Amino acid sequence: MPSKSPSEYTQQEVAVWLNSIGLGSKIDGFKENAIDGAMLVTLTPDDLTGDLGFSSLQVRKFQQSLEFANSLAEGGGGGGDPEKLQALEEENQRLKQQITDLKMKNKELYEKLSSSTQSAPVPAPPPPQAYSHPPPQTHRAPAPAPRPAGAPVIRGAAGGAT
C-alpha cells in the first residue's frame, strides 16, 4: 500500500517528517512560514539555506529524504524491484519453514530427554578428590624461645652493641 505523498502533507505532518529525518531543529522555521506539503516539494536549496537556515549537508539530507518519501508514495518501496521482492518473500517462507522444522525437532529431543531421565536415575557426581599433591607448606623460621622473667638482654653483633 503506497504511503501518502509528501505534497499532500499537512503542516503538522511536515513537522513530524522533519523530526523523523533528524531535522527537528528546523521545525520552527517551517511553522513560521506555514510550510505544508504543497510548498515542501517546491523548496529549493537556496530557500532551505537562505530562508530556513539549513547547512549544505542538511540540504542534501532533506533532498534525499524527500526523494525517498516520494518513491514510497509512488509504490516503489524506496526503489526495490519486483523480482527482488519475490525472492525475499520466497526466502522468508523458506526460513519460516526451517523454524517450524527446528521447533518440531527441539520438541522431539526434549521428549526423548524427558523419557530417558525418568526411566534411568541420574548417578550422583563422584565425591571430590583429595589433593593429588599435598598443599604447599609455608616455611617460617621458628619463633624464639620466650625469655625468662628477669633474664638479662644479651646483644650480639647482630643486635647492634652499644
Image (spheres, rainbow, N blue to C red):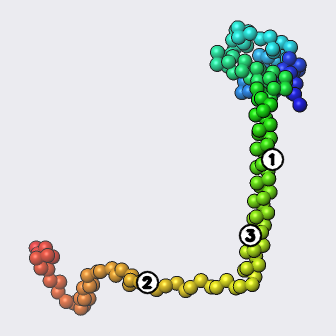
* Residue 119, horizontal then vertical, whole percent: 75, 84
Q: How crowded is mark 3: few (under 14 residues within 10 Å), some or many (20 or more)?
A: few
Q: Residue at x 17, y 83 (%)?
A: 153
* Residue 77, numbered label: none
Residue 142 appears in which quarter of the rendering?
A: bottom left
- Front residue of 116 and 56: 116
- Front residue of 120 and 5: 120
Q: Name the residue under label 3.
A: 109
Q: How far apart are marks 1 and 2 (CA)?
A: 58 Å
Would residue 150 appear left or right of 30 to someone viewing this image? left
- Front residue of 66 and 116: 116
Q: Nearer the viewer, mark 1 or mark 2?
A: 1
* Residue 103, horizontal then vertical, whole percent: 78, 61
* Residue 58, horizontal then vertical, whole percent: 67, 19
Q: Could you tell which of marks 1 and 3 lies nearer the N-terminus?
A: 1
Check the picture and name the quadrant holding the C terminus: bottom left
Q: The residue under label 1 is which amino acid type?
A: Gln
Q: Residue at x 76, y 44 (%)?
A: 91
- Front residue of 13 and 124: 124
Q: How far apart are marks 2 and 3 (CA)?
A: 39 Å
The answer to whether residue 34 is seen in the rendering is no
Q: Name the residue under label 1.
A: 93
